[in-house]
Structure formats: structure tokens, C-alpha cells
């Protein structure tokens, strides 16, 4: 079993370009050889990634997790009146986290590990070229028809039933109910819904100039893990997201729960305690550039 006793853990504060304070947690292993930025999925607080972060640090990394603005310990204020929009998490928050980690771990190769939207938003980070390698886990287009059909009724109810009701009543999406994540600002939900309702997802908003982006500047190689029982980031949805990164080398690794020695993974299970078989593959890619077995070029 990996010894975690040498992993130092401390909470830190990051400041974005627009002056927003974000809360992060730094995990530092003994004699680190790589720096890893973990970027969360929509509504997941940074603490959700603590087990994977500690594992990677114990292997020899400096790992930073952080809460996007409006989420977890980076929240506060009247969420219903919030002007936070979905791309702000990449354009401002991921950019700040990359810069902070590059300074904190100066001299180490900088890499990123993105869960769900945390991988999609690499293309919004202004300084994505600081990273030498990216790992995606359960990262795929949010367009509902690319997801497993069994999930369609729930997603449509979420977007147009439950979500609309919450916006009308509360002005935001509260935690609880059918939503298992942190409370969401209204613009975040509306943009996410708009993208997920069309086959082209976020591409029209990029083409129109609505949001500044850097998808056409990402050149660091990407390896993406798609999990067979994930109803959202299916193989097709994962391939869709990889296609946004047109200038870089991309690979897709397909994994079943059984192959990783667990009964269930789903959309978020890769980061729950006891997923060391997958974390080992992530480590080998991020620290050593070794592609996992069966990873196919895309």
C-alpha cells in the first residue's frame, strides 16, 4: 500500500485576474517530480478529489485542487444575483490556478487532470501552454443525445423541468433535490443548458466570439479516459470533446469497472476512494508520458 505519511496538505488562496479569491488545497509529496492541477466537474467541490490528489502526491507530485468561483469555499454572496458564467471557470479560474501552481512548483513539468467540464475548459485557459500534458477523465460533450438513452428522460427533466422551476423560485440551482452537486449560479446553469441542448454544443458560442477561447492553441498531448458505465461521457461524447482540440495529439482509453477491479464507476466514481488502478494509469501518463494499454489515437 502507498505510504501517505509524507504528503503535506495545506489550504491556499488564489487570486484571479479580476480579483476573485479562490480556495485551493495543495498536496506535496516527498521529492516531487511533476506538478498536477486537478480541475473539477460541474458542481463538485475540491474535497471530492482529495483521495486521488493524495495518491498522486504520494507517488511524487505537487497537486493542486481548487474550487471554481461560486462553488464550495470559493462561494459566498447572493448566488441568485451572481454574474458568474460557465466559461469563467476556465477563462479566469483555471488560468489563475495554472499560474499559481507554475510558480509554486517552479522547475517541475506542469500537467492537468480534468474531470468532466474540468477537461472541456482547458481550451478556455489563457495560459494552457504552461502545461506539457493533459489527462481527461469522464470528459465529454454535454449534448444529451450523445449520452446513454436511459439517461435522456432525467436530463430533459433536469434542463427544462426541475432547473426551470428552481430558477423561477430561487433564482439559482440549490444543492439537494435531484441535483447532487453544489449550488449553481443561474448563468452557469443557463449556459450549460444551452450548450447541452444542441449537437454543436459550445462551438457556436466560440465561432461567434461570444467567449474568448484558446482551443486552437492547445498543443500539449491529451489522453482521455472514457468509462463504460458512465451515462454521460460516453465514447461518442468523449470523442466529440477531443475534436475541439484540433492541433494536438489525442488518445482515448476505454475502461470498464471490472478492468479496474471495482463494481461501478459512473460519471464520478473514478475519483472515489479505492480507484488506485485507474490513478496508477493517470500517474504514468502525467508523470512519465506513458500511454495506458489500449489507448487509441483520435
Image (cartoon, grey):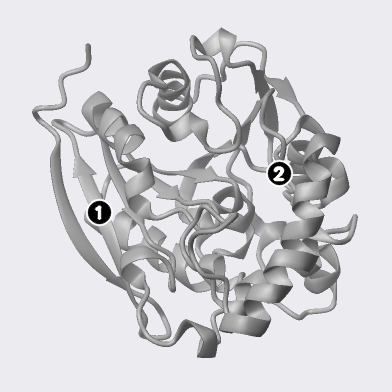
In terms of secondary structure, where does tag 2 sit?
Answer: loop
**At 59% across and 46% down in the image, what residue appears?**
116
**At 32% across and 49% down in the image, what residue appears?**
47
Q: How many numbered discs?
A: 2
Pointer 1 and pointer 2: residues touching (CB < 8 Å)? no
**At 39% across and 48% down in the image, what residue appears?**
37
According to the image, label 2 marks what residue? 140
Residue 4 in the image, given as x and y percentages of width and height? 16, 26
According to the image, label 1 marks what residue? 25
Identify the image quadrant of residue 60: top left
Q: Quadrant of the N terminus?
A: top left
Identify the image quadrant of residue 158: bottom right
Classify mark 2: residues with Cα within 10 Å, few (<14), some (14-19) or many (20+): many
The Cα atoms of the two marked residues, 1 and 2, are separated by: 26 Å
Nearest to the observer: residue 21 or residue 107: 21
**At 82% across and 48% down in the image, what residue appears?**
153
Q: Quadrant of the C terminus?
A: top right
Q: Is residue 217 above or below residue 186?
A: above
Residue 36 in the image, given as x and y percentages of width and height? 37, 42
**Could one spot residue 148 in this view of the protein?**
no
Residue 154 in the image, given as x and y percentages of width and height? 75, 49
Nearest to the observer: residue 244 or residue 70: 70
Q: Is residue 178 above or below residue 110?
A: below
Identify the image quadrant of residue 62: top left
In terms of secondary structure, where does tag 1 sit?
Answer: strand
- Kindly give the residue lying farthest to the left in the view shown: 5
Left or right: where does residue 80 sit relative to residue 249? left
Query: Which disc, if any, is residue 90?
Result: none
Classify mark 1: residues with Cα within 10 Å, few (<14), some (14-19) or many (20+): some
**Could one spot residue 208 in this view of the protein?**
yes
Amino acid at each position: 500500500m502507498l505510504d501517505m505519511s509524507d504528503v503535506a496538505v495545506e489550504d491556499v488562496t488564489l487570486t484571479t485576474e479580476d480579483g476573485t479569491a479562490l480556495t485551493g488545497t495543495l498536496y506535496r509529496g516527498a521529492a516531487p517530480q511533476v506538478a498536477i492541477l486537478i480541475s473539477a466537474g460541474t458542481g463538485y467541490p475540491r474535497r471530492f478529489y482529495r483521495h486521488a490528489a493524495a495518491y498522486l502526491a504520494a507517488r511524487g507530485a505537487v497537486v493542486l485542487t481548487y474550487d471554481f468561483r461560486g462553488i464550495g469555499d470559493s462561494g459566498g454572496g447572493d448566488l441568485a444575483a451572481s454574474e458568474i458564467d460557465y466559461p469563467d471557470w476556465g477563462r479566469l479560474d483555471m488560468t489563475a490556478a495554472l499560474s499559481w501552481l507554475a510558480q509554486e512548483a517552479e522547475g517541475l513539468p506542469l500537467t492537468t487532470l480534468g474531470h468532466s467540464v474540468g477537461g472541456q475548459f482547458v481550451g478556455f485557459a489563457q495560459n494552457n501552454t504552461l502545461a506539457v500534458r493533459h489527462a481527461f477523465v469522464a470528459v465529454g460533450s454535454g449534448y444529451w443525445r450523445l449520452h446513454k438513452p436511459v439517461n435522456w428522460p432525467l436530463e430533459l427533466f433536469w434542463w427544462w423541468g426541475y432547473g426551470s422551476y428552481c430558477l423561477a423560485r430561487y433564482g439559482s440551482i440549490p444543492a439537494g433535490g435531484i441535483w447532487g452537486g453544489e449550488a449553481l449560479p443561474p448563468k452557469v446553469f443557463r449556459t450549460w443548458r444551452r450548450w447541452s441542448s444542441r449537437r454543436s454544443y459550445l462551438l457556436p458560442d466560440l465561432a461567434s466570439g461570444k467567449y474568448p477561447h484558446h482551443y486552437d492553441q492547445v498543443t500539449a498531448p491529451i489522453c482521455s479516459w472514457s468509462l463504460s458505465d458512465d451515462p454521460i461521457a460516453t465514447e461518442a461524447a468523449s470523442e466529440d470533446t477531443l475534436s475541439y482540440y484540433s492541433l494536438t495529439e489525442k488518445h482515448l482509453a476505454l475502461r470498464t469497472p471490472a478492468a479496474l477491479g471495482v463494481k461501478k464507476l459512473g460519471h464520478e466514481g473514478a475519483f472515489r476512494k479505492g480507484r488506485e488502478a485507474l490513478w496508477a494509469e493517470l500517474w504514468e501518463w502525467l508523470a512519465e508520458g506513458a500511454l495506458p494499454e489500449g489507448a487509441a489515437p483520435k
